[in-house]
Amino acid sequence: MNTTPHDTTLTSADGRSALRMERRLPHPPRKVWAALTDPAALGRWFPSEVTVDLTPGGAMSFRFPGAAPGDPGMTGTVTDVEEPRLFAFTWGTDHLSWTVTPDGEGSLLTLVHTFGDRPGAASFASGWHLCVGALARLLDGDPTALGRDDGGLHESYITRLGLDRGTVEPVGPDGSQGWRVRFERQLVRPAESVWAVLSAGIEPVAGLPVPEGFTTATAPAGPVTEVRAPRSRTYAGEPHSSVTWELGEGTGHGARLVLTQTGPAGWDPDAALAAWRTRIEQLAAALVDA
């Protein structure tokens, strides 16, 4: 499978994010347009079966493979239709805009996916990467079965889109009451698998030192203060800091990690930020190989 990312950018403003992906196709715009808008063609490369009233304000429905009988699936509304240039619609709370422009003897296909869950952007990017690859095969007359990502494609987009970076937040005015380091990252395996990698067979127990997998050099093993395997675990770090690992629901591709470490005013949050970034990269790599 080709894991080279397409031309892709991610921007965020006012609580919404926009993922922009481009793909050059050696086919004329009208041929690409037909593959974008004909439900029979859509069903061969889009992640769900689609019905569509191809008029502005028209209704859409999305039914995913394996859905139970009677499951209504998701719905959307066509927002823009300008044949053969622009097709845009809502999909639940998200918005998708597909633009086709001439590019020599072929076309430039541009997708802008707008959504609220910025940490989920790598899941969306890797999913669209596979879908657009299937669309390209459809246009070429080749088999269109969607490929599967073992996690490597997802992780390449984590890096490309800058989703591997944490934040440092002050506690109190200007950090007068301390600092908080925070990472939120979509992972490629379920919580149980993540927990197994972190614990390495040594289950955290309240009052005992936390297993090494949960620590860094700036947050060595202190006593566990709370544990709810395989979802959450808090321990006392040094100097006088608290570390919490939380594994929640994400995009459906795996667990969503939220990691925080809070320390006092004299603590060095930048060193902690760098140490946790390295530790989470190690975890992510181990999960791809798991």
Image: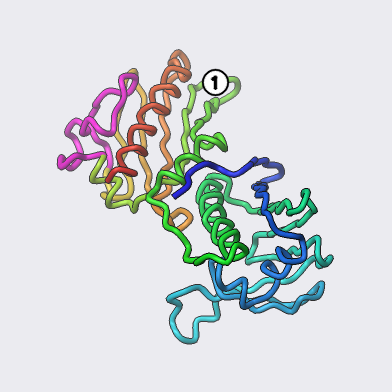
Task: State yes or no: residue 206 in magenta.
Answer: yes
Residue drawn at 42 percent across, 28 percent down: 277
Residue drawn at 49 percent across, 24 percent down: 179
In the rendered structure, which amino acid carries the disc numbered 1?
Gly
Where is residue 114 shown, x and y percent of the image? 67, 53
- Say if residue 149 shows up in the picture: yes
State the residue lying farthest toward the right.
82
Task: State yes or no: residue 192 in magenta.
Answer: no
Would you name the residue on which mark 1 appears? 175
Pick the residue in front: 45 or 29: 29
Where is residue 95 shown, x and y percent of the image? 69, 59
Where is residue 155 shown, x and y percent of the image? 45, 41
Where is residue 148 shown, x and y percent of the image? 42, 57
Task: Examine the rendered structure and indicate whether residue 261 appears above or below residue 116.
Answer: above
Pick the residue in front: 73 or 160: 160
Task: Examine the rendered structure and indicate whether residue 69 appears above or below residue 44.
Answer: below
Task: Examine the rendered structure and indicate whether residue 75 appears above or below residue 110.
Answer: below
Q: Which residues are magenta?
A: 198-226
Image quadrant of residue 266? Answer: top left
Residue count near mark 1 (Cα–Cα under 10 Å), binned few <14, some 14–19, many ≥20: some
- Say if residue 171 shows up in the picture: no
Dominant SS in magenta: loop
Residue drawn at 23 percent across, 45 percent down: 196
